[in-house]
Amino acid sequence: MEQPPRRPRVTGAVVAREAGVSAATVSYVLNDTPGQSIPESTRRRVLDAAARLGYRPNAAARSLRVGRSDVVVGLVPDTGYTATFSALMATLATSLSAVGLSLLLQPAPLGTSRLAELLRTVDPVGVVALTPVDDDVVASLQGSGVRVVVGIAGTGDLRPWQVQFGSGEFGATQAQHLRDRGHDRIGLVRWAREHPSATDLGRASALLRVMADAGQAQIPVLDVPTDPDAAEQALVTWLRDHPEVTAVATMDDDVAALVVSSADRLGIAVPGSLAVVGAYDFPIGTLVRPALTTVRADLGALIDRFTEIIRSAVADPAWPLPGRIAVDTARIVVRGST
Amino acid sequence: MEQPPRRPRVTGAVVAREAGVSAATVSYVLNDTPGQSIPESTRRRVLDAAARLGYRPNAAARSLRVGRSDVVVGLVPDTGYTATFSALMATLATSLSAVGLSLLLQPAPLGTSRLAELLRTVDPVGVVALTPVDDDVVASLQGSGVRVVVGIAGTGDLRPWQVQFGSGEFGATQAQHLRDRGHDRIGLVRWAREHPSATDLGRASALLRVMADAGQAQIPVLDVPTDPDAAEQALVTWLRDHPEVTAVATMDDDVAALVVSSADRLGIAVPGSLAVVGAYDFPIGTLVRPALTTVRADLGALIDRFTEIIRSAVADPAWPLPGRIAVDTARIVVRGST
DNA sequence: TTGTAGGCGTTATCAT
DNA sequence: ATGATAACGCCTACAA
C-alpha cells in the first residue's frame, strides 16, 4: 500500500496564466473587490478558467494575508454534551458553511491560557460557546481579533456578544402551559443531584415567577433519587403528601415518564387528575401513555440567529455590537399528558 | 460599545529579537529540528523569551509553508447524529488536541465535489468519517494530501485506512450474552422503518451468525410501529405467537423498555420467562424495572485507537498504511433484564 | 553554531 | 483596466 502522489495545487497564479491575466486580476474578479472596474470579457475568462481548473483559494494563505481565518471556534462542554447541543453544533456547522465559515470544535472548559493559545494559533473570527465563559476569558478574546462571541448564558447577567439559550425559558414555558390549562397548584420534579446546576435553579425560579402571578407563592419540589426503586417510592410518597398538586413540571422526559408510570400504579389518572409536562422531547416521551407533553428548544430559530449574528459581525468591519440579545427558543409540544 | 484594539502579534521574529538570536534559531529550538546542535544557553534564552512573550506559532503561516494543516476534518451525518457519535467527536477533539491536532466538523453527506473543495481549502491532514464514504470520495481524498482516513464501516468490505466501529459487533455481543445465559431460541425486535439501515441488517446477520452455532437457524423478527398503542399491540401479539422465544435482543433501549412493559402487562416475568437485552445504554434503561441489560460502545478504546492511528500517520511521512483494522468496541452492561 | 534568503498563496498598494 | 510588487509568519537549504 503506497501513499499516492499528490496532485499539483491549482493556485491563483495558475488560473491567471490560463486566463491570460495577472494573479492580481484573478483575485479582484474572484473576490468582487470593490472599487475595481473589470470588463465583462476579462471577468468571464477568469471565471471560466477558475471553474475549468477547479480552483479553490487556499485558506492558510488567505488567513495569513488578512490576519484572520474563516474559522469559528465552538466551545463544547467536555461533559454533559447532550444530544441537543450536538444537534445544535452539527446544524450550526452546516449553516456556517453556507456563509463560507467553518466550525472548529474545541472541548471546554478551557483555562484562559489554553484558550488564548488556541486563539493566537488559529485566529478565529468568532467563538460560539456552549459552555459558560469567564470574564477573563472574554477579556482575552477581545484582544485577539475575535469579532464576535455568542454563547449560552448560565446564571447571572448576559454579557455583550452573548445570546441566551434555554434553561430559564423552559421553566416559564412549562408553567405558562399549565396555567393555560387551568392549573394553579403545580409541583416540580427533578433528579436529585449533589449540587443543583444553574439550569436546575433557573428552571425552578422561572416556574415560581410565572406561578406567583397565578397566586401560587411556593412550589413543592421533589428531588428524585436515580435508583429506580427508590425513585418510585419517593414519587409515590410525594404524590400522596401533596394532594393539592394538580400538575407537575419535570426537568426532563425521563423523570416525566417515571411520574406517569408511578401515577398509573397509584391509580391517579393522567392528565385527568394529574397533568405532567416534561422537557427536551426525548424519544421515551412518545412511548409512554399518555404520550408526554414536553418543552423543547427550537434549534432552527436559534441557529439562524447564531449564524446571522456571526455573519454580520464578520462582514461588517465596524459591526455595532448588539449588547445583550435574548432569544426565546422554548417551544411547547402538546401531547397527551396535559 | 466599541471594538477593542487588537494587540500586536507575537511572531517568531519578535521572540528572536528578545532572545538576541535570529528567527531561524527560534524555529530550530521550538521545533527541536533534528540535525542541529544548539547550545543549552541559547536554547534556554529562546525558550524563556517565547514563554515570557506568550509566543504561539501562527497556524496559517505554518500550513502555508508546510503545505498541510493541523486540521483533522470530521465528517458527521446531518441526520441521525446520535449522542454516541457526538460524545465520540467531543472526546476525539480533546484527544487530538493533546497531540497538536484540531478537529474541524463538517456536516455530511458531502458530494465529492463539495468535499474536494473543502480539502483543497483547508488541506486537512486527516479525515474522520462517521458517515459512509463513497469510493470516489476516497479517491479524491487520496490525491489531496490527506494522510489518513478513519471511518465507520457500513456494509461491505472495509477499505484501507478505515477503522470499523459498532453495528455488527453489537448484534454478536447481544447474542453471545444470551447464549451464555443459556438461551438458544431468541428473537429480534427493531423499530419498523421503510428501509432497514445497514446497521439494522448488520445487527440481524451477526445475531444469526452467533445463534446458528447454538442450533438456531432462523430468528423471529418483529418490526415495531412507532405509534405507542400499535406498538404494544404488535408486541403482545408477537410474544403470544412465539412462545418458544425465551429471550429477545433489541435495536435500542427504547424498544427494549417497551418490550419489558408489554411483558409486564402480559404477566410474563422478566428475566425469568423472557430475557431482554437492549442497546446503547440509554437513560431509560436504568429507570425501568428490571433495569435493562444493554450493549454499548467502549468509546474510550475507540478514540484512543483513532487518535493513535492519526497521530502516527501524521508524524511519520512514510507511514505504512495499516490496511484493514477492526476494533471491537461493543461491551455488555449486565443489569436485571437478563 | 547561527544567520541569510527565498518561497509557500493571497491580497492590497501603487504604478502603468 | 490591469500588472508588478510587497507583505503576512513560518520553515529550511545553504552560507558564513
Image (cartoon, coloured by chain):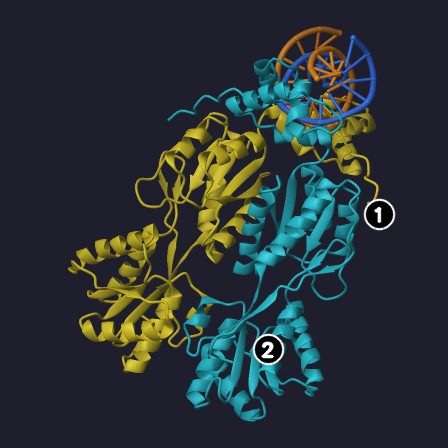
Chain colours: A yellow, B cyan, C orange, D blue
Under circle 2, the secondary element is helix
The answer to whether residue B30 is above or below residue A187 is above
Q: Residue at x 39, y 32 (%)?
A: A136
Q: CA distance from mark 2 to mark 1?
A: 41 Å
- The residue at 18%/56% (across/down) is A212
Numbered circles on residues, count: 2
Residue B130 appears in which quarter of the rendering? bottom right
Please give left or right for residue A239 compared with residue A10 in the image: left
Percent of width and height locating residue A96 = 55, 42
Residue most toward the front?
Answer: B40
One can see residue A281 in this view: yes
Identified by mark 1, the residue type is Glu
Q: Amino acid at mark 2?
A: His
Q: Name which quarter of the figure residue B34 lies in.
A: top right
Instruction: Kindly indicate whether the residue at mark 1 contacts the one at mark 2 (C-beta within 8 angstroms).
Output: no
Residue marked by disc 1:
A2
What residue would you read off at disc 2?
Answer: B177
In the rendered view, tell whether residue C16 sits above or below residue A136.
Answer: above
Image x and y of residue A286, in percent = 44, 71
Chain letter belonging to callout 1: A
The quadrant of the image that shows the N terminus of chain B is top left
